[in-house]
Amino acid sequence: MTESSSTDPVRLEFTGPHEINRWRPLFHWLIAIPHFLVLWVLGVLAWVCLFVAFFTVLFTKAIPDQLFGLVVMTYRYSWRVSSYVLWMREEYPPFDFTATSLDNGMDPNTKLEIDYPNELVRWGPLYKWFLAIPHFIAIWFLGIGAIFVGIWAFFAVLFTGRYPPGARDYLVGLQRWTLRVQAYAGFLRDEYPPFSLD
């Protein structure tokens, strides 16, 4: 089980057995093609929403709840697909488009929530991306490590039918760290993210 702190305003969790059918690493990416198409559309939607959020925060110090929920939904959908494509689980992710900041529990293996802020720093959109640069650099290097961890996990599942716990924890932790940075640099939260996989 790889869970984040329940008190953190940005939460990403994954639960599920480490035992995976050995054939899964060979075909999950192929079975997930419909989700890739949906993710492309949702990615465009997320960028449009963040563009609008930039101005709503500057002028009102808030993001409309529906807009916030749409952005979080795109992150949640992406997390569900990523956990499947990285063969962490066998259950096919749902085509769920519930635009809320809190997870509806439709996918029992994954959870992604970002608490809605009552007020944001008005000028945050002008400087948050700059303050997040050290995180971008760290995540880039950890992402390179994730490639090797993913290759290791691929062969481990292929030959043993078991996802290495350390590998899964690393990949989930990196996704959690990335989400916290996205929430900060994308104007969703004001808390500066920790340099941590936990």
Image: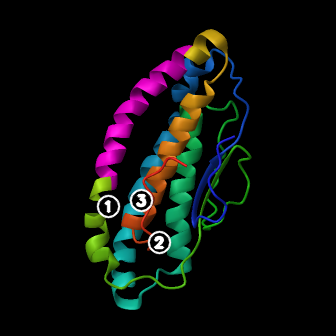
> Crowding near pointer 3: few (<14 within 10 Å), some, many (20+)?
some
User: Percent x, y for residue 42?
Assistant: 46, 55
* Highlighted range, magenta: 135-155
User: Was residue 140 drawn as part of the magenta stretch in this picture?
Assistant: yes
Sequence-earlier tag: 2 or 1: 1
Q: Is residue 129 left or right of residue 45?
A: left
As helix, strand or loop, the secondary structure at mark 3 comes to helix
Q: Residue at x 36, y 65 (%)?
A: 185
Judged left or right of residue 95, residue 126 is left
Which quadrant is the N terminus positioned in? top right
- Residue 182 tag number: 3
Work out whether mark 3 precedes mark 1 in sequence or the reverse, and give the earlier one: 1
Foreground residue, 64 or 149? 149
Residue at image mark 1: 132
User: What's the distance in space between the residues labelled 2 and 1, CA to CA?
Assistant: 13 Å
| Kind of residue at disc 1 | Ala
Q: Earlier in the sequence, mark 3 or mark 2?
A: 3
Dominant SS of magenta comes to helix
**Relative to 160, residue 47 above or below:** below
Q: Which residue is mark 2?
A: 189
Q: CA distance from mark 3 to mark 2?
A: 9 Å
Rendered image coloring scheme: rainbow
**Quadrant of residue 122 within the rendered picture:** bottom left
Amino acid on which the number 2 mark rests in the picture = Arg
* Left or right for 14, reference 54: right
Whether residue 34 is visible? no
Q: Tell me the residue at 59%/35% (across/down).
A: 84
State the SS at label 1.
Answer: loop
Q: Do callouts 3 and 2 mark residues in contact (Cβ within 8 Å)?
A: no
